[in-house]
Image (spheres, grey):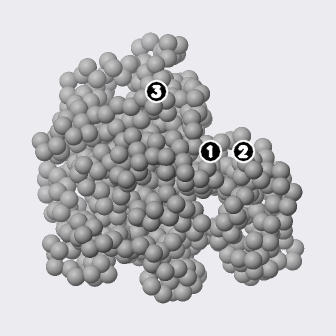
């Protein structure tokens, strides 16, 4: 936290940002003044955002916010009608119909581009096809596709007919897919025959068929995209329908729906129990994410935004709306970011002239050992901003990306939120400038605070990240589990959302995250976030990634155990474990010397490259690791033995 501000936009760039233009429109002199007004008068702010971004409500809302049922059940843009699909596609056809709306890049280098006019044609015909297959407003549509233009089209077409989008991670096994089909019972499941990752075919249709069997019925049709071009795709006559045939349907207009009409159920994996289905709605989801794209990543018409993610994670839908609702191009990539070579991601950035590239901290750390020369081989001059989300971004990889790759000219828009948030709690606004590893501050309209165990605001120390007021993008509860929703977020402090992250604010007002509060280590009464220990470990050139966990200790109550992945040239270094231990002592003090350091080949990660500490800890202690369906690399589990 003892860091200076290392980057600010020049006057010209600052004046061109959406934030500065919005401030000028409303006669607001400073960013701090704007943030304060967005919290003190949220109804003014969100109404002004809708007006500034031109979100097309076909029927105007009569009330911005309704708290009559309490903060957990706030309603937004009451009485209005809107459709996410129209806000992302139709509104741009007249003004920029010939400009690219979606570009898809495959792992093998093949790419496709659809203009806004072409995207509307695909989306409207797919929507008409869904209606022809019996999908009605309020029905669910499961989408099990690789990150691709087809996945974006499926999201928008589902929204277009007023159905509920169920995004499913493309790497799930059949049981995990089935778990996301059980409660909403989609009428239609859209899947691919397969796709290639690291040069190997991922057979998605077989997984989809098995999932439908496990779910036990209720799915009338499976729409199959011949994405991999397989000749041996299994087929069930009378149930399976080719994507190409569905696109021959008559086009459907976007159905105006109530602002609070559900648009998506996004599932998140918990430590125990079933995945939680977070319900999101047309009005709040569209407005909040469009605002994030404009005011944080500063996306403008003509820009090109790509996030290294999957439609099954919240950043897939986020990228879609953040780009398209602001008239920019959404770029998808379906493969591994370092295949066939370690420069693959940078190659994609150059090829498609990306202006915004979003990464996870773990992905940044994974690319770092390959060296910045891999990035310098490519012309990255089009990049105006990096994005980062998923976990705290340690200082060393932050500096590497900012200095070595971006040449200290490309800001890192570090953001943090969650599936249930639907967007961002904390994020860097360009007008604030950058501090290494900082998340800047609360996003506009987000009444964030840091509190102690009694719910009292604290500064200069680590506390719980909370939200003291609702916001448009918040989940409308967990699907069919309202009590679980209230117990998860609202029961600790009355009227306050407790997010489950440790946070702190420095003397300049910049915010930092310190890991999940349920991951926090308590070593002899001294609390430390795992991210702080991991930052010390990955600062060593010989370590690629690390996970710090707490294990029971008869003296200290809890002791630190570190799992570290060595770089390729350090795998056989017999001194590395000891040097990891000494570096932790050097950075954090003797009290935090780890009880053990284990060198492993890999750590369990999600597709978005987030390290699953809870899984590491459970395996180390011989406990049930809970839901493993979101793992990208289940083979990593064999390397983590019981302590």
* Front position among marks 2 and 3: 2
Q: What label does residue 192 carry, if any?
A: 3
Q: Residue at point 29% right, 54% down?
A: 286
Checking the image for residue 636, the label placed there is 2
Q: Is residue 307 left or right of residue 564?
A: left
Q: Secondary structure at mark 2?
A: helix
Work out how far the residue at label 1 is from the one at label 3, CA to CA, in angstroms: 20 Å
Horizontal side, residue 339 vs residue 187: left or right: right
Within 10 Å of the Cα at label 2, are there few (<14), some (14-19), or many (20+) other Cα atoms? Answer: some
State the image coordinates of residue 344 (x, y, percent, origin top left): 51, 41
Residue ID at (44%, 82%): 509
Q: Position of residue 93 (x, y in %)?
A: 16, 40
- Residue 383 in sight from this viewpoint: yes
Disc 1 to disc 2, C-alpha distance: 9 Å
* Sequence-first disc among 1 and 3: 3
Tell me which corner region of the image, top left, top right, bottom left or bottom right, holds residue 197.
top right
Please identify, in this view, whether the residue under mark 1 or under mark 2 is nearer the observer. 2
Query: Is there any visible trace of residue 260 in the rendered image?
Result: no
For disc 1, the marked residue is 631
Query: Callout 1: 10 Å neighbours few (<14), some, many (20+)?
Result: many
Residue 424 position, x and y percent, is 41, 63
| Residues at circles 1 and 2 in contact by the CB criterion of under 8 Å | yes
User: Observer-nearest residue: 295 or 485?
Assistant: 295
Question: Of label 2 and label 3, which has the lower sequence position?
Answer: 3
Q: CA distance from mark 2 to mark 3?
A: 27 Å
């Amino acid at each position: 936290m003892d860091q200076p501000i290392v980057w600010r936009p020049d006057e010209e760039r600052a004046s061109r940002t959406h934030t500065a233009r919005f401030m000028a429109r409303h006669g607001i002199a400073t960013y701090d003044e704007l943030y304060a007004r967005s919290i003190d008068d949220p109804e003014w702010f969100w109404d002004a955002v809708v007006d500034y971004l031109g979100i097309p409500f076909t029927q105007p809302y009569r009330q911005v916010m309704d708290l009559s049922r309490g903060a957990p059940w706030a309603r937004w843009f009451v009485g209005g009608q809107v459709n996410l699909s129209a806000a992302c596609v139709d509104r741009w056809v007249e003004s920029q119909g010939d400009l690219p709306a979606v570009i898809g890049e495959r792992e093998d280098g093949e790419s496709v581009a659809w203009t806004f006019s072409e995207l509307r044609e695909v989306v409207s015909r797919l929507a008409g096809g869904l209606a022809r297959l019996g999908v009605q407003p309020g029905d669910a549509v499961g989408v099990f596709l690789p990150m691709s233009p087809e996945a974006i089209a499926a999201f928008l077409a589902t929204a277009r007919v007023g159905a509920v989008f169920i995004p499913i991670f493309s790497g799930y096994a059949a049981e995990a897919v089935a778990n996301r089909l059980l409660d909403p019972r989609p009428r239609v499941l859209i899947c691919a025959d397969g796709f290639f990752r690291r040069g190997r075919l991922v057979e998605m249709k077989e997984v989809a068929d098995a999932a439908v069997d496990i779910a036990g019925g209720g799915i009338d049709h499976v729409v199959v995209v011949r994405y991999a071009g397989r000749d041996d795709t299994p087929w069930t006559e009378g149930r399976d329908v080719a994507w190409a045939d569905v696109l021959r349907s008559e086009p459907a207009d976007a159905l105006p729906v109530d602002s609070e009409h559900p648009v998506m159920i996004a599932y998140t994996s918990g430590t125990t129990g079933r995945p939680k289905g977070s319900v999101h709605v047309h009005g709040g989801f569209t407005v909040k994410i469009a605002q994030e794209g404009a005011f944080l990543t500063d996306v403008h018409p003509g820009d090109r935004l790509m996030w290294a993610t999957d439609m099954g994670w919240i950043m897939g839908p986020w990228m879609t709306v953040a780009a398209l609702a602001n008239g920019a191009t959404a770029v998808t990539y379906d493969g591994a970011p370092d295949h066939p070579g370690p420069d693959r991601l940078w190659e994609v950035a150059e090829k498609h002239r990306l202006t915004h590239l979003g990464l996870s901290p773990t992905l940044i750390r994974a690319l770092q050992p390959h060296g910045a020369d891999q990035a310098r081989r490519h012309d990255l001059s089009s990049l105006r901003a990096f994005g980062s989300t998923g976990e705290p971004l340690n200082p060393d990889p932050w500096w590497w990306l900012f200095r070595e790759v971006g040449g200290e000219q490309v800001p890192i828009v570090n953001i943090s939120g969650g599936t249930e948030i639907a967007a961002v709690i904390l994020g860097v606004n360009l007008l604030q400038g950058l501090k290494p590893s900082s998340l800047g501050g609360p996003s506009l309209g987000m009444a964030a605070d840091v509190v102690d165990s009694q719910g009292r605001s604290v500064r200069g120390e680590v506390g719980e990240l909370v939200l003291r007021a609702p916001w448009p993008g918040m989940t409308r509860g967990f699907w069919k589990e309202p009590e679980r929703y209230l117990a998860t977020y609202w029961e600790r402090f009355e009227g306050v959302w407790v997010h489950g992250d440790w946070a702190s604010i420095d003397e300049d007002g910049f915010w930092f995250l310190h890991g999940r509060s349920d991951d926090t280590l308590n070593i002899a009464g001294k609390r430390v976030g795992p991210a702080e220990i991991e930052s010390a470990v990955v600062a060593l050139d010989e370590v690629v990634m690390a996970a710090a966990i707490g294990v029971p200790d008869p003296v200290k109550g809890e002791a630190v155990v570190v799992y570290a992945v060595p770089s390729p040239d350090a795998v056989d270094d017999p001194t590395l474990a000891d040097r990891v231990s000494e570096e932790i002592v050097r950075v954090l003090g003797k009290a935090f010397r780890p009880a053990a350091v284990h060198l492993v080949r890999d750590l369990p990660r999600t597709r978005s490259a987030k390290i699953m500490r809870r899984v590491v800890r459970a395996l180390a202690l011989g406990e049930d690791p809970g839901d493993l369906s979101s793992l990208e690399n289940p083979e990593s589990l064999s390397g983590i033995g019981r302590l």
